[in-house]
């Protein structure tokens, strides 16, 4: 989930918190493992080397990685070794981004097996030998844990792969490791800090290490941006893919809810949860989404995809930052020059009415879904219900709650079953405001193919004491509606990435990819990070 720019204001137009205004988490230095990145007990940054040697695989796409393997220049083993060395130099050491919560101990053995398979039978699928990171709330039946970043699940090993993981393996993907995240996908406290988990500690923004990566798919976004893997899988309930993708300068697709199976993912909301791809290019994100959803999106990769499209500008979601507005005006100019017709304004006025109802729905669905998930874990798990999890956190307060508490857990525990009239009414309100009177109404009124908005503001300075500092965003309406949204790099403010979001109606994923790809090809604004200690505010 994603926190709001102002947790008290409840401005739903600010949908970005990686999980709805509930902040991402930041965490206890005392909970950090020995290899943790550089955050000390007071949250200060240690003086670490940030200048990096050139990396042989920097910014290589999936197609380019496949080409170097097909040519014999590299094997799955040699690629895995290079990426793991990169993890040593950038994630564990050097700038210590700490995007990865756990490496796959079988990564090299798996790479050898994929190499043998290529020699004897040919590639298994489109991701054969391609290194992938999987967010640590997605079940993998291997030697890695699935913990949602919580110490309560630090030894929890899934009995079976999530369906999306089965699809990855069937396509030949090499799962390099699990990505760190905002603990419990940012649904624990009303004033947490994105990118922290009790088990994994703090993920840092690779563009400016004292800045926040947003959440909850913090590690997935930072890991791909820092070239620790080719692509990654994140999850979103409200902003958890698009916010970190924007803040970390990568592409993130939040698909139509239901397009990708949600089974085997530690849940928050059955009506809003979805997994989705995070990558450095639209083409790679589309390829990964195709694997996750068992669909082919390659025909959407049309550089002329904006020609003739009517694109609405949700002008009421601008205005939270003058420099972000300037970046977006340049993006709008590029969209117009690529042949699209802009309808400006094409506002989304119902967002501000949504957050109370959304929070109510999430609290009900979280309790219901999490109780079911935890009950299915083995007896070695110390917390097999939300109530037991609350008790566990209290008993381990020094490690789990040194900076913020579990207010959302307590609110959720107080809710009744999904048969409650209050839940049904809140869900109906959410669907009406986000769909019929929200996105659908704006699309229909202006005869639009899609709507564009700023994804969010520049990454804020990580603040262990006060929590997240969101300034603006646009994730809430498509999140609550269950509709797709895609964010791609649109420019920079003081060297910090800014994303632009294309959103549309249900099942418009293909069309949004087409529009986003055309914008990317016209602008090519992705820039690899430099791991600076802090942002250059003079730029």
Image: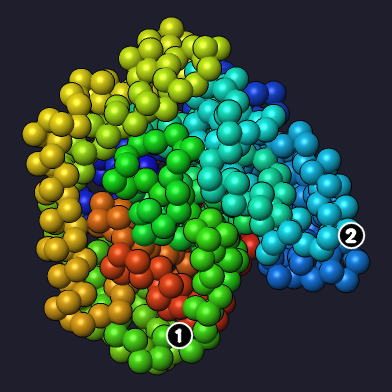
Q: Is residue 11 left or right of residue 204?
A: left
User: Picture quarter containing residue 372?
Assistant: top left
Residue matched to label 2: 119
> Could you tell me which residue is drawn at 71 percent across and 54 percent down?
172
Q: Is residue 431 left or right of residue 187?
A: left
x%, y% of residue 108?
83, 42
Q: Looking at the image, which is closer to me, 324 or 483? A: 483
Return the disc, 2 or 1, that comes first in the chain's sequence.
Answer: 2
Label 2 – label 1 distance at C-alpha:
38 Å
Q: In the image, is 442 to the left or to the right of 143? A: left
Residue 150 in view in this figure: yes
Mark 1 crowdedness (10 Å alpha carbons): few <14, some 14-19, many ≥20: many
Quarter of the figure that contains the N terminus: top left
Q: Quadrant of residue 432?
A: bottom left
Quickly name the residue at label 1. 305
Residue 50 at x, y = what percent?
71, 48
Q: Residue at x 88, y 58 (%)?
A: 120
402 w.r.t. 424: above or below: above
Residue 40 image point, x, y percent: 59, 26
Which residue corresponds to the image point at 14% horizontal and 63% vertical from the top-left? 436
2 or 1: mark nearer the eye: 2
Where's residue 49, x and y in %?
A: 74, 43
Is 23 placed above or below 295 here? above
Q: What secondary structure is marked by label 2?
A: helix
Vertical side of 329 occupied by 136: above or below: above
Q: Quadrant of residue 290?
A: bottom right
At horizontal 23% and vertical 32% (from top left) the residue drawn is 364
Q: Helix, strand, or loop for circle 1?
A: loop
């Amino acid at each position: 989930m994603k926190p709001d720019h102002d947790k008290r204001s409840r401005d739903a137009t600010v949908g970005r918190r990686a999980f709805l205004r509930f902040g991402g988490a930041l965490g206890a230095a005392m909970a950090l493992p020995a290899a943790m990145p550089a955050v000390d007990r007071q949250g200060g940054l240690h003086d670490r080397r940030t200048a990096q040697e050139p990396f042989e695989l920097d910014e290589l796409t999936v197609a380019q990685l496949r080409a170097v393997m097909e040519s014999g220049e590299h094997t799955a083993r040699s690629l895995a070794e290079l990426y793991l060395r990169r993890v040593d130099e950038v994630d564990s050491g050097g700038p210590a981004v700490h995007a990865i919560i756990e490496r796959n101990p079988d990564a090299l053995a798996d790479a050898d097996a994929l190499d043998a398979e290529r020699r004897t039978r040919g590639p298994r699928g489109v991701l054969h030998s391609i290194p992938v990171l999987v967010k640590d709330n997605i079940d993998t039946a291997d030697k890695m844990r699935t913990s949602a970043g919580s110490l309560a699940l630090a030894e929890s090993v899934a009995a079976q792969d999530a369906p999306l993981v089965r699809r990855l393996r069937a396509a030949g993907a090499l799962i390099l490791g699990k990505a760190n995240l905002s603990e419990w996908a940012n649904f624990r406290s009303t004033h947490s800090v994105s990118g922290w988990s009790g088990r994994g500690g703090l993920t840092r923004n690779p563009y400016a290490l004292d800045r926040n990566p947003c959440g909850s798919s913090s590690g997935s976004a930072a890991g791909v941006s820092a070239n620790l893997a080719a692509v990654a899988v994140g999850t979103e309930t409200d902003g958890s893919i698009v916010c970190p993708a924007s803040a970390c300068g990568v592409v993130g697709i939040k698909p139509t809810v239901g397009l990708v199976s949600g089974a085997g993912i530690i849940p928050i909301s059955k009506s809003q949860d979805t997994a989705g791809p995070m990558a450095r290019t639209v083409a790679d994100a589309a390829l990964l989404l195709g694997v996750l959803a068992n669909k082919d999106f390659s025909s959407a990769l049309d550089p002329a995809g904006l020609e003739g499209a009517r694109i609405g500008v949700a002008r009421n979601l601008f205005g939270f930052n003058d420099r972000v507005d300037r970046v977006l005006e340049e993006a709008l100019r590029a969209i117009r020059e690529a042949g699209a017709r802009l309808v400006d304004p094409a506002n989304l006025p119902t967002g501000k009415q949504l957050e109370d109802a959304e929070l109510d729905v999430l609290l009900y669905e979280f309790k219901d879904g999490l109780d079911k998930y935890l009950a299915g874990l083995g007896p070695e798990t110390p917390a097999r219900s939300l109530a037991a999890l609350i008790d566990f956190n209290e008993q381990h307060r020094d490690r789990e709650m040194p900076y913020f508490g579990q207010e959302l857990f307590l609110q959720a525990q107080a809710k009744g079953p999904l048969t409650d009239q209050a839940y049904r009414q809140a869900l109906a309100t959410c669907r009406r405001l986000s769909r019929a009177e929200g996105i659908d109404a704006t699309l229909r009124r202006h005869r639009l193919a899609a709507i564009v908005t700023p994804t969010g503001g520049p990454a804020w300075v990580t603040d262990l004491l006060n929590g997240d500092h969101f300034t603006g965003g646009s994730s809430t309406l498509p999140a609550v509606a269950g509709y797709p949204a895609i964010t791609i790099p649109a420019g920079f403010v003081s060297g910090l990435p800014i994303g632009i979001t294309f959103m549309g109606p249900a099942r418009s994923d293909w069309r949004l990819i087409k529009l986003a790809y055309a914008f990317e090809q016209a602008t090519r604004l992705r820039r690899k990070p430099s791991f600076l200690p802090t942002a250059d505010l003079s730029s």
